[in-house]
Image: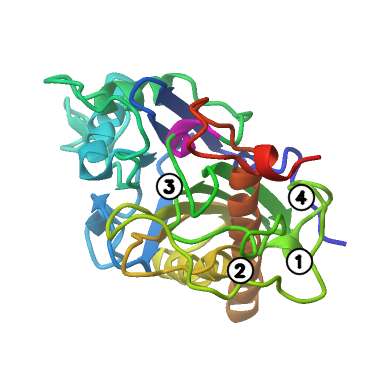
């Protein structure tokens, strides 16, 4: 029987903390993954409209081998400024890539990759004038990082939407048969749907553990309309962002393979997915606590669990989302819960 980590969150991975901040007026938010120490990272993009910053730092052929934090943000390209608030906080706390000899005063440059989703047309007041909310949201998210955090309409998932339902922030974890810990976090703002057509059934239901998103199971066959190409909005107005983390001692190249495999979780949880309308991306972080002794088999095992946890995180984000109170974006709970 598959087991989750202690809290069924990405923070079950030792050395990983999460912080969230959102602005109810603007209807947007920021999520920060803050490791206790600089960490190996990688990423893989499958959507046709990505928005990213500092992801070149994750290329194994480049100089910087580890990063200081990861940022997921609403706001489309405007939300990329959230990383500046995170960098400022890290620098204030003496964290970053060291420059210069250690025996003399030297500078630290925080390396903070980030990715954004589009939430600019969800009804919030986006007329913020000269002061963008995103740097402050990034800093606030850093200040409240914790091992425990809420799911649903919070952080980068606060303003998120999907086809027919409110989106949100979800997370899950899993312990593999070999004892590796794998966790995921997803901000679900997909062009497609997390449920089968207009039904209450989640595409990710076969991978659910316990009742983490309702324990309603799957129908014997897909409901009418489940295979129809239903989607929301226009090009560039969507995107699902995910982060997977593991306690395995991965190289950057191995972490890249896990990020690639983890995209299967999006395919199991959303329909359609990886479209030209989305900027779907998966990051992978590895804390290096447990050695990888049988590389091909271990990577396959970790990557499989990564895909499972991404799928479950997506369903949990939609299942636990709350509405804006304007009646425009209906939640799963409002539409289907008895």
**Residue at horizontal 82 percent and vertical 74 percent from the top:** 220
The percent coordinates of residue 278 (x first, y second) are: 35, 61
Mark 2 or 1, nearer chain start: 1
Q: Is the residue under label 4 in contact with that under label 3 (CB below 8 Å)?
A: no
* Residue 316 x, y percent position in the rendering: 65, 46
Q: Earlier in the sequence, mark 3 or mark 2?
A: 3
Point 26% across, 23% down: residue: 133
Query: Can you identify the residue that label 2 sits on?
Result: 268
> Is the C-beta separation of discs 3 and 2 under 8 Å?
no
Query: Does label 1 or label 3 sit earlier along the sequence?
Result: 3
Q: In whole angstroms, how far apart are the C-alphas of marks 1 and 4?
A: 15 Å
Q: Which residue is mark 4?
A: 4
Real-space Cα distance between discs 3 and 4? 23 Å
Name the residue that disc number 3 marks: 39
Q: Check disc 1 and report the residue beneath it.
A: 206
Disc 4 to disc 2, C-alpha distance: 19 Å
106 to 40, vertically: above or below: above
Q: Which residues are magenta?
A: 153-158
């Amino acid at each position: 029987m598959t087991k989750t980590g202690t809290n069924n969150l990405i923070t079950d991975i030792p050395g990983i903390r999460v912080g969230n901040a959102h602005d109810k007026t603007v209807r947007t938010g920021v999520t920060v993954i803050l490791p206790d120490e600089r960490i190996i990272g990688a990423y893989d993009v499958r959507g046709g409209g990505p928005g990213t910053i500092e992801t070149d730092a994750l290329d194994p052929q480049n100089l910087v081998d580890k990063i200081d934090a990861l940022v997921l943000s609403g706001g489309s390209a405007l939300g990329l400024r959230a990383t500046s608030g995170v960098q400022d906080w890290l620098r204030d706390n003496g964290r970053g890539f060291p420059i210069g000899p250690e025996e003399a005063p030297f500078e630290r440059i925080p390396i903070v990759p980030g990715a954004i989703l589009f939430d600019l047309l969800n009804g919030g007041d986006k007329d913020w004038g000269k002061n963008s909310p995103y740097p402050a949201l990034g800093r606030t998210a850093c200040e409240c990082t914790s091992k425990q955090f809420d799911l649903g309409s919070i952080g980068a998932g606060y303003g998120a939407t999907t086809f027919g339902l409110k989106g949100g922030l979800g997370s899950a974890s899993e312990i593999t048969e070999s004892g590796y810990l794998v966790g995921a976090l997803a901000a679900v703002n997909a062009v497609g749907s997390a449920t089968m057509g207009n039904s209450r059934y989640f595409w990710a239901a076969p991978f659910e553990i316990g009742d983490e998103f309702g324990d309603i199971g799957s129908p014997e066959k897909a409901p009418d309309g489940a295979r129809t190409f239903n989607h929301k909005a226009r090009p560039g107005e969507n995107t699902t962002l995910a982060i997977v983390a593991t306690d395995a001692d991965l190289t950057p190249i191995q972490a890249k393979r896990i990020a690639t495999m983890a995209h299967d979780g999006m395919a199991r949880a959303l329909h359609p997915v990886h479209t030209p309308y989305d900027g779907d991306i998966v990051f992978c972080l590895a804390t290096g606590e447990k050695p990888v002794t049988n590389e091909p088999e271990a990577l396959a095992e970790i990557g499989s669990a990564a895909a499972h946890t991404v799928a479950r995180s997506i369903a949990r984000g939609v299942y636990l989302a709350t509405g804006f109170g304007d009646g425009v974006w209906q939640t799963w709970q409002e539409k289907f819960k008895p």
